Image (cartoon, grey):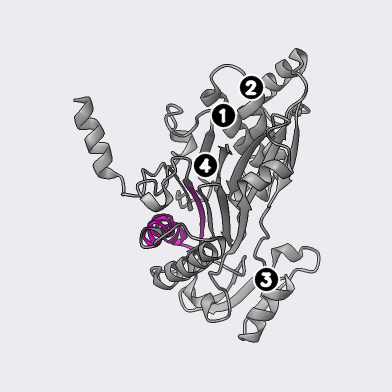
Amino acid sequence: AREREKLHLAEKCPSYGCPIYPVEMSNLTSTSKIATRNHVMLTHMSNRPTGVNQDRIVMIPSFAADNSKIDDSNNFFIGLFDGHDDRGHEIASYAAKEIPFQIASTLNHLDKPPSPNEMTQIFTDIFRNVDKNAPSIGGGCTAMAVIRIGTTLYLANTGDSTQFIAIYHPPSKLVEEKSNHNKRYIQNMTRPSSEQLNLQGRISIHHQNKLHKANFPDEKSRIENLGGRIHIPPKHPMGSRVIVRSTTHHEDVGLAMSRSIGDAEWTEVGVIADPDVQIVNLEEFWNANNISTKDSKMFVVLGSDGLFDARRVEFVAKHLAYGFFESDGDIAEQMLTVGKKLVNMASPIKVKFYRDDISFVAKVVEL
């Protein structure tokens, strides 16, 4: 029976790996594959009356490891897609399936592992292709993909979601009194509270992506040169919008980002799918930051604006580092509790206020 179950699972997985998707936080019954000692992924639906979570996350361990040209069990793919407009969740679902599939298919046709420049072009071509062929149903999504191939990490971003690398620098030793305080803090979901996390180690943030907003000069000039209209609030320029007269909604509609997947009505005025791609040679990164010699740890984080509009990257990174490296007991259970704490801390105290979909994924990266 066990062998039949393994075969059944294998038959359901694509050739490039078995995707792991998060479960709506309110429906979680166990950690399962959602949280382990090396990763956590969580999503929580907004309090919109539609009752639809528009965020999508996918993680594929051992990504494309069946491909002999890039064989490495440490490879992985992580994607996060934040949908918007009425049917943005459908575009996000489409992108979450198509982007890893098309990347794996492209890699499979190469004669050797791609160079960094080749991989950057692969990302660009595939994001453009997914955008071009996305269902024209009214809606779009951000797109983030982090891929490890051998000792190279690629971080691609289109839109206004957030991703970064964090390094945890441990203390010489953990102080029991502080550990007990942090454990009580993480488990306490009551708000407001004067308590704060007192991480005993130190966090540094690296390779945080640039958000694609229409107020930035390069984005602004591209859109305006194609006849696009941009609204930039004087006191809150990051709240800029690309305005089009929508035939779907029969009114002016503002898009909160200058790059996205889908959003066909905005494509005509310069909203593009081209990602920014950061390339990290892990061996060089390890040595430059003395990760091995200082017993430091590295992890990568991707999150939707529902989390990062409410909390700074350092706040999120410290909480995740506590769960991964300073908590005791069952690490998977601790990571799930930390994840719920982050959702709690990113939500408004009063339930009557609007809460966006909140989604994030974090994974420890080892050399």
Residue 366, quarter of picture = top right
Q: Between tags 2 and 3, which lies in front?
A: 2
Identify the residue position indicated by label 2 in the image: 327
Q: Earlier in the sequence, mark 4 or mark 1?
A: 4
> In the rendered structure, which amino acid carries the disc numbered 3?
Ala
Q: Which of the labelled discs sits on residue 209, or is there none? A: none
Q: How many marks?
A: 4
- Magenta span includes 97: yes
Q: Between tags 4 and 2, which lies in front?
A: 2
Residue range highlighted in magenta: 77-106
Q: Earlier in the sequence, mark 2 or mark 1?
A: 2
> In the rendered structure, which amino acid carries the disc numbered 1?
Met
Q: CA distance from mark 3 to mark 1?
A: 36 Å
Identify the residue position indicated by label 3 in the image: 214
Where's residue 183, x and y in %?
67, 20
Q: Residues within 10 Å of mark 3 (few under 14, many from 20)?
A: many
Q: Earlier in the sequence, mark 4 or mark 2?
A: 4
Q: Which of the labelled discs sits on residue 44, or is there none? A: 4
Q: Between tags 4 and 3, which lies in front?
A: 3
Image quadrant occupied by the C terminus: top right
Identify the residue position indicated by label 1 in the image: 335
**Residue at 65%, 80% in the rendered image:** 222
Q: Is residue 65 above or below residue 90?
A: above
Q: Is residue 169 above or below residue 211?
A: above
Indicate left or right for 342 with 216 as reference: left
**Residue at 67%, 28% in the rendered image:** 322
> In the rendered structure, which amino acid carries the disc numbered 4?
His
